[in-house]
Amino acid sequence: MLSWIIAFSILGSIGAVAGAALMLVFPDDIRRTLVPSLVSYATGTLLGAAFLGMIPAALKQAQTFLVSATVLAGMVLFFVLEKLVLWRHCHDIECEVHGRAGSLLLVGDAFHNFVDGVVIAAAFLTTIPLGIAASLAVIAHEVPQEVGDFAILLDNGYGRKRALILNGLSAAATLPGAVAAYFWLGETRKAVPYILALSAASFIYIAAADLIPGLHKQTTPAASMRQIVLLLFGIGTIAFFHLGS
């Protein structure tokens, strides 16, 4: 199980940075289409992983009220963290948060990626399909996030090579988060359903508070149809990995 967790944690961190770096190679007009498309897909994977995987798994191990209360508490927690600039998912260089220093961005990203590692570990400790589904959701929503991060760092005067290295170091926080959670949750299995509930809260919050409002900025019928199709495809991907097991 630890091997699965380590492998997908590395894939989640390195894969997101590599995907973001690859997307930066494309011309601006292509990237302006690709990033919103990936955000639509990521929204579906996040919502699918939360509602089809994490919450049902948590409900099998703990009381409904306690799981629901934990999800609610998590939503409030992530709202507070976003206010502290430790948790945000802007994909637009005009975003207000992007005026902050690059160093603060990297600290917030490292914290966020550490939590992603905890999410991956908790999911794998429940079932392998849930772990794969959670990892896929992490990768899908981190790629467009990393694209935005690169843009912020470059705007703050960082060179491309330095921005890539620093983003990679920030993303590497996923692995220690996953390993620490594996050993901690291995000793405290009763905490697993509540970690799953908090993980679901983080996914729902990112999708509802950060990603979906950005999608509403595109109002043409073609863009709206593309968003709906990709969102449903994201949900379907999670259903395939989790429910098809």
Image (cartoon, rainbow, N blue to C red):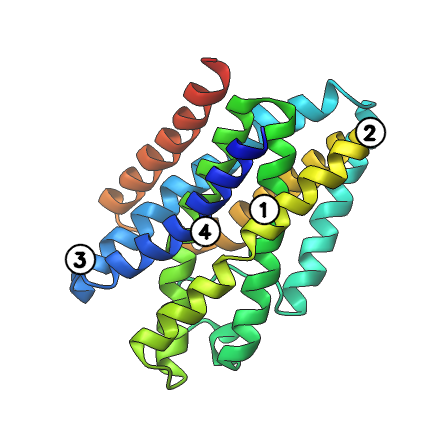
Q: Looking at the image, is mark 1 or mark 4 earlier in the sequence?
A: 4
| Mark 1 vs mark 3, CA separation in Å | 31 Å
Q: Are marks 1 and 2 in contact (CB under 8 Å)?
A: no
Q: Looking at the image, is mark 1 or mark 2 earlier in the sequence?
A: 1
Seen in the picture, residue 131 relative to 210 is either above or below; the reply is above
Q: Which residue is mark 4?
A: 13
Residue type at the position of mark 1:
Gly
Is residue 104 at all visible to an observer of this figure? yes
Closest to the camera, between mark 3 and mark 4, is 4
| Mark 1 vs mark 4, CA separation in Å | 9 Å
Residue at position x 73%, y 46% from top?
74
Disc on res. 30: 3
Q: Return the x and y of residue 85 as percentages of the image width and height.
A: 61, 69
Q: Are marks 3 and 2 in contact (CB under 8 Å)?
A: no
Q: Are marks 1 and 4 in contact (CB under 8 Å)?
A: no
Q: What secondary structure is marked by label 4? A: helix
Seen in the picture, residue 34 relative to 196 is either above or below; the reply is below
Q: Which residue is mark 1?
A: 117
Q: Looking at the image, is mark 1 or mark 3 earlier in the sequence?
A: 3
| Mark 3 vs mark 4, CA separation in Å | 24 Å
Q: Looking at the image, is mark 4 or mark 2 earlier in the sequence?
A: 4
Seen in the picture, residue 126 relative to 197 is either above or below; the reply is above
Q: Are marks 3 and 4 in contact (CB under 8 Å)?
A: no
Instruction: State the image quarter where residue 104 is shown.
Output: bottom right
Would residue 208 appear left or right of 55 to someone viewing this image?
Answer: left
Residue type at the position of mark 3:
Ile
| Mark 3 vs mark 2, CA separation in Å | 47 Å
Q: Pick whichever, 190 or 209, lies toward us.
A: 190
Residue type at the position of mark 2:
Lys
Residue at position x 57%, y 43% from top?
203
Residue at position x 63%, y 50% from top?
177
